[in-house]
Amino acid sequence: MLISEIQQKIIAILADGQLHSGTELAEKLNVSRSAICKQLKNITELGLEVSAVTGKGYRLKSPLQLLSNNNIRKDLTASAESLISSLEIHQSIHSTNSYLLDRAGQEKSTGIVCFSEYQAAGKGRRGREWVSPFGSNIYLSILWQFQAGPASISGLSLAVAVAVIRALNDCGVEDVGLKWPNDIYWQHKKLAGILIEVSGETNGPCHAVIGLGLNLYLPKEKAKSITQDWVDLSQIIDNHPGQIRNKLSAALLNHLMPIIATFDDKGLGNYIEAWRSFDCMKGKQVQLFMGKQVFSGVVAGIDDNGLLLLVDEQGKIRAFASGEVSFRQS
């Protein structure tokens, strides 16, 4: 869904969360009040919650902090800054992952960072849609070239998950954990997801697109299509999380970029113990879904290769490289 210039201007005015009259908006944008009404209707389709107060005007239910290249960069470490070849912020995009996959293989196509305020078709794991209302959350993808091929980055998603937890901790978000292999959870509810897509040669250079969706504030109307338990930062921290979007975006890059850039040399071993310290599933009774097969057992953690260890009813430990884990409801 394309976002017109006038819609962007209206959103920028309403971002402060204060009331703005239809007359004020019309005068500032040099359009009619009826045009403002039409544009506001289109804006609600982006997932923004616009309230109309009779005789006073319009406001957003929650203020927005729109993403800013300058505000993100000012909080970057020198290390992270040096690893970024391009930092792009889009108003609307089909999918940040799809966009960067299309860029893979082009000249200098490494170190490209892509944010978007809105995704028309955000991608989750296993073909699911990632619900992506405008300006409320973080939708981030990073394109990186690895020289040794896909086998050299086995376990990258687990290391990336560690980076996300560390960034959240830096911004005062505590008590978050990891659900194998790379979902970020809070009290058994999903806060963020990671999707890594790889293209290139089997035994030669390859490109990986590392995608992250992080819920800061999800309007309930937009969240109706989500089929699993979810949570957003507005339910976890006292201050409105939308006001730290740029700071959190920078913190994510500060932790993600060095891990991604050195992973094919350092490997997963450097992050195994950190991942284990954030494990929120160990000792839990779960079900593991692999196609039509379902395995039940108690999680015994992960092995040194990042495989899930599951203890079955006979006490046998089995290791799994893939599958969808579901906490068993008590």
Image (spheres, rainbow, N blue to C red):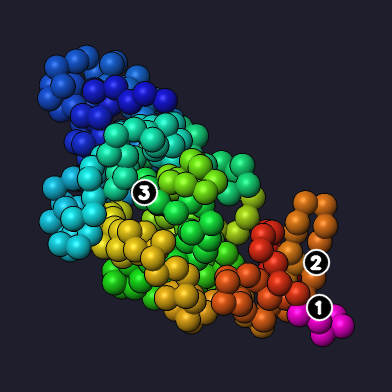
Dot 1 amino acid type: Asp
| Proximity of marks 2 and 3: CB atoms separated by less than 8 Å | no
Please, what secondary structure does the residue beneath circle 3 have? strand
Percent across and percent down for residue 302 are 61, 76
Quadrant position of the N terminus in the picture = top left
Q: Marks 1 and 3, how far apart in space?
A: 39 Å
Seen in the picture, residue 119 relative to 246 is either above or below; the reply is above
Nearer the observer: mark 2 or 3; the answer is 3
Residue where numbered disc 3 is placed: 144
Q: Marks 2 and 3, how far apart in space?
A: 35 Å
Residue 117 belongs to the span the image colors magenta = no
Look at the image and give the residue range highlighted in magenta.
313-317
Q: 76 or 229: nearer the eye?
A: 76
Of the image marks 1 and 3, the number of the one nearer the N terminus: 3
Percent across and percent down for residue 211 are 44, 49
Label 1: how many Cα within 10 Å (few below 14, some 14–19, many 20+): some
| Proximity of marks 1 and 2: CB atoms separated by less than 8 Å | yes
Label 2: how many Cα within 10 Å (few below 14, some 14–19, many 20+): some
Quadrant hosting residue 230: bottom right
Of the image marks 1 and 2, the number of the one nearer the N terminus: 2
Residue 193 in view, yes or no: no
Residue where numbered disc 2 is placed: 295
Label 3: how many Cα within 10 Å (few below 14, some 14–19, many 20+): many
Task: Name which residue lies at 44% across and 54% down.
Answer: 148
Task: Name which residue lies at 36% across and 59% down.
Answer: 260
Residue 315 belongs to the span the image colors magenta = yes
Q: Residue furthest right?
A: 314
Dot 3 amino acid type: Trp
Residue where numbered disc 1 is placed: 312
Q: Residue furthest front?
A: 203
